[in-house]
Amino acid sequence: MYKMKNNYGERIAKAQKVMEREGYSCLILGPSANMYYFTGLKTTPDERLQLVVIPAAGEPAAILPEMYQSKAAEQIAGSFPLLAWADQQDPVDLVKEAVPRKAEGPVAVDDTLWASHLLQIMPVFPEAIFRPASRVVDSLRMFKDEEEIALMARAHAAADRVLERVRQEIRPGMEERELAFFIETAYREEGCDDISFKPIVASGPNSASPHHQTGNRKFQAGDMVVVDCGGLFQGYCSDVTRTFCLGDGDAEIKAVYQAVKEANEAAFQRIGEGYAGEKAGCSGEEADRAAREAITRAGYGPYFIHRTGHGIGLDVHEAPYLVEGNGEKLLPGMVFSIEPGIYLPGRFGVRIEDIVAVTSQGPVRLNRYSRDFLEIQ
Amino acid sequence: MYKMKNNYGERIAKAQKVMEREGYSCLILGPSANMYYFTGLKTTPDERLQLVVIPAAGEPAAILPEMYQSKAAEQIAGSFPLLAWADQQDPVDLVKEAVPRKAEGPVAVDDTLWASHLLQIMPVFPEAIFRPASRVVDSLRMFKDEEEIALMARAHAAADRVLERVRQEIRPGMEERELAFFIETAYREEGCDDISFKPIVASGPNSASPHHQTGNRKFQAGDMVVVDCGGLFQGYCSDVTRTFCLGDGDAEIKAVYQAVKEANEAAFQRIGEGYAGEKAGCSGEEADRAAREAITRAGYGPYFIHRTGHGIGLDVHEAPYLVEGNGEKLLPGMVFSIEPGIYLPGRFGVRIEDIVAVTSQGPVRLNRYSRDFLEIQ
């Protein structure tokens, strides 16, 4: 039987229990946070097939290009077999070797596996139904252990320091992408291994677009500037948003800001209220409604055009989601964003995003940067 | 009928011709270089479904999250319909609206579309066979027009300048990831919008791993350091590799370096020889063999453990591939890497990578940095 470093073996055993219970024949992972979570293998997706096959019972196996073999062998340290293929070979033959002989039941495939790779391996399972791996792994990955939460707290302490540096750096005349690159550098300087996603810097009318692509617009006096960014600390992501006002905000800007701030607080409070020791907290949709109601009360309901939050961990976006339709409870161990926003098309937008961990004492914010109105003079 | 900005309409018409000829019912693109190539839409993949559906005949349609709508509408400027879905809706209903009524024949899906999204839309096409979109689009994207090659030349001029800055910066005591971050910054300073992939900085024994993950090893005197990096210029990638020797290289280091340099030149020459005006050049596998023969002649055949090259354009890796088994000719308009390497496990490695465009006058290198032995004293 395989022996794993750290708690990988335990995690695999837990996934196998889920697979057995739900009738899955195997779990097929691509280069992803899932692969890292279950094996410690860290690799970048590309056109070469890279898989880890975890059967419902028995030993996993990796299928990797020969050129990645030496590094991967170090990472998994002989815990399970590694089948390497050369550029002139067809790796599908190795997949056939790696899958359980009498595989019955659905196959769970990694959500982010490339379609070309899924289509490549489908003929190995001519009868199988395929389902996204999230149905097997979310129930594990959603619950962070103490070490994971400690790493995320470190990642968010760095995010707090970066936001303070942004506050000191931001000024009219600066370009969006100039600030974005300042942020990328600052995360490294603050001890992160990398950024967790490309910083979103959305200024003036661009701030009304929630996922604006940072461009070369220059900040002007009077702009609202949404800064949404995060770093990676030992594989774990941070993700925070603050909105800065360059100069004095007028009454409407302040009213919108206040509504977003109250919505953020309303969702946080709702989670705390619903929470009672080991008993279930409030659901994802209840938290979403609490934020939405606050914004609707302020008269901006139609301008809050996205869900209230998403889980976060090894991926920036993962389960659970704070969205209408998610009746699942937010339980201890879960870590997610609360990020209401108001977006007035062609004018400006405001978003305030915190990351919250549910603990046995209730919800706590992992980042601590001020949510007060941030006027830059 | 739809009108497209720039040459998007023309590109779609060409893809539709291929689809009609090969019997495809439609082409489904995710957030990818393909989406950008055909529509100008630039967006990042995430858990929210984002698609462009191009039927074999008729008008395309985009299906995007509501929060991406305003930006996307700007990018496509009304050329075709944009169906937006809110976070609490099921986007699959919109996919049903967007696909041709009587779709027959295989569906081509974007190679990099997430498996979870492919599984999500498969029920819309209960009878269909799915194939990777590369079978439709490679025949277009492989052939770069003059403007594309000009952009790639700009991207590679920046890469040359970055390599020169690396030569000036690199020294014993520096960490791999410190140099990697220097490179990231340098690409921006040299006019690129971003890096095209995370720089590979592999020092000492790490250089024997072709896709080493840049870490915190400190360079030591006597190290070989493989630096593989590239920038993005208006969407187009550069990708170059040089291997630096910190100090005097011994006879074996120099012999290995010389063999790799000759292999690089042998492949380039082979492409030039096979080339005669409008007539076909040499094939991908012939170019690969030329490089491999040079390394085998020097006695290092078993240590050249990857293909000789890959196409490059909007993606860092795309068709055509210089690999055994690819009998397709390398024709004018194609742009690809020549990157032979020798990797001595536990000791050191050398790789020299250039990007070559085939023109009507034969092959030309887009980067010009010296391929001579690079000793850093």
Image (cartoon, coloured by chain):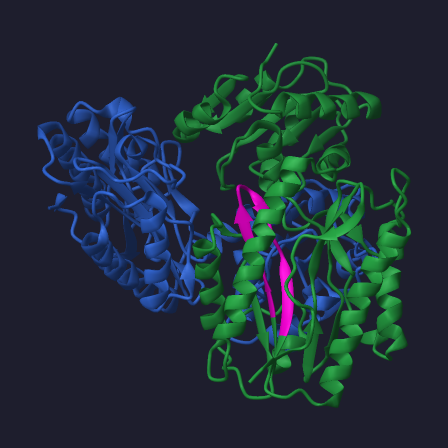
Chain colours: A green, B blue
Q: Is residue B79 visible?
A: no
- When the figure is inspected, residue B49 is found, relative to residue B267, above or below; the finding is below
> If the image is split into quadrants, where does the N terminus of chain B sit?
bottom right
Q: How far across and how far down the image is residue B140, in percent? A: 48, 56
Depicted A79 relative to depicted A214: above or below: above
Residue B36 at x, y = what percent? 54, 63
Decide: is B79 above or below B36. below
- Horizontal side of A109 relative to B337 (left or right) equals right
- Residue positioned 62% across, 15% down in the render: A59
Q: Nearer the viewer, residue A26 or B186?
A: B186
Report the magenta stretch's main SS.
strand
Whether residue A242 appears in magenta in the rendering, the answer is yes
Which is nearer the eye, B288 or B332? B288
Q: Quadrant of residue A261?
A: bottom right
Q: Is residue A27 left or right of residue A135?
A: left
Identify the residue shown where x is 64% and y is 19%: A99
**In the image, farthest residue toward the front:** A361
**What span is colored magenta in the figure?**
A227-243
In reply to whether residue A39 is colored magenta, the answer given is no
